[in-house]
Amino acid sequence: MQRERGSLRVLLLQIRDGQQVRREELESFAHYSGLSLRQIDVLNVFDQPDVPLNAADGYDALWVGGASEANVLEPQAYPFVTSCISLLNVCLERNLPVFASCFGFQLAVLALGGVIRHKEVDFEMGTLPISLSLAAAEDPLFSHLNDPFYAVSVHKQFADQVPDCCQVLAYTRQCVHAFRVWQKPFWAFQFHPEVDRRVLVERLTYYQQKYTAGEGHLQSVLDAAVETPQSNGLLSRFVDQVLLI
């Protein structure tokens, strides 16, 4: 019997310190998944850095958000990196569906034994055209997308390749942008499927000192931003094609 959307319960692993962005990220995940806020519990690692291995027990899926106050390459400064990686490995072992965005993508690469690199200048920022791999045509989430499609992406850390257990689904010249773990309900996205142009404007303005060289640079990025309806549809498709099948 097919499950009802309203019966689903999801855990959002959140890596946000500021209250404004915490709220906005949760609302974005809810909006684009088609789930209500009451169906999504939040575990924020700034409040609970020692993430329990059983944190996702009893949920239908784990979602992992982005981060701008943390760096996966600095586990000494951000000890929750290690416990988040352990939780992702538990989800893999148990076949719990995972949808990991941006920082979640980077955690997933590390959990699978891959390498994350850093780019301090000329990193991707704004709404980008992202290309599909040949494998995307057979993927339940990506098969309907245009090639290229546009998505919101702002990141200094990236992966230029993924472990052999993964199937690359989308990429840019700089890096891999999406993969699925072979034969697992586990997808990771370097871009932000949960973020649209309006939220990009709000979030990049909030974090402008971290990512931009001043008001002029910020405005040029925002002026070039476009709507990203296809990437924003991935969350709902994950619910429909993975959680409700």
Image: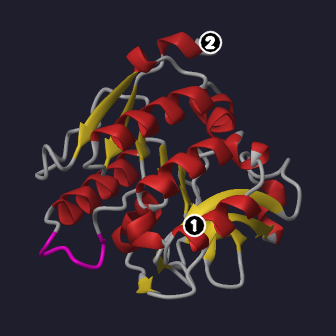
Would residue 199 appear left or right of 19 to someone viewing this image?
Answer: right
* Image: 6 above or below 44: above
Q: Dividing the picture into quarters, in which one does residue 209 lie?
A: bottom left
Number of numbered discs: 2
Which residue in the protein does label 1 denote? 218
- 121 or 234, nearer to the observer: 121
Regarding mark 1 in the picture, which secondary structure is present there?
A: helix
Instruction: Determine the residue positioned at 41% across, 60% down.
Output: 207
Which residue in the protein does label 2 denote? 1
Decide which of tag 2 and tag 1 comes sooner along the chain: 2
Residue 221, percent from left and from top: 66, 67
Instruction: Determine the residue positioned at 71% across, 84% down.
Output: 173
Instruction: Determine the residue positioned at 53% across, 11% down.
Output: 6
State the predominant SS element of the stretch in magenta.
loop
* Image: 60 above or below 218: above
On whether residue 47 falls in the magenta region, the answer is: no
Q: Amino acid at mark 2?
A: Met
In three-dimensional space, the C-alpha distance between marks 2 and 1, rounded to whole angstroms, equals 50 Å
On the question of residue 85 being in view, the answer is yes
Mark 1, Cα crowd under 10 Å, few <14 / some 14-19 / many 20+, is some
Query: Which residues make up the magenta segment?
Result: 71-77
Instruction: Determine the residue positioned at 78% across, 71% down.
Output: 133
- 232 or 9, nearer to the observer: 232
Would residue 66 appear left or right of 204 to someone viewing this image?
Answer: left
Q: Quadrant of the C terminus?
A: top right
On the question of residue 185 being in view, the answer is no
Which numbered disc, 2 or 1, marks the residue closer to the eye? 1
* Image: 79 above or below 15: below
Would residue 83 appear left or right of 193 to someone viewing this image?
Answer: left
Q: Quadrant of the N terminus?
A: top right
Mark 2, Cα crowd under 10 Å, few <14 / some 14-19 / many 20+, is few
Q: Which mark is residue 173?
A: none
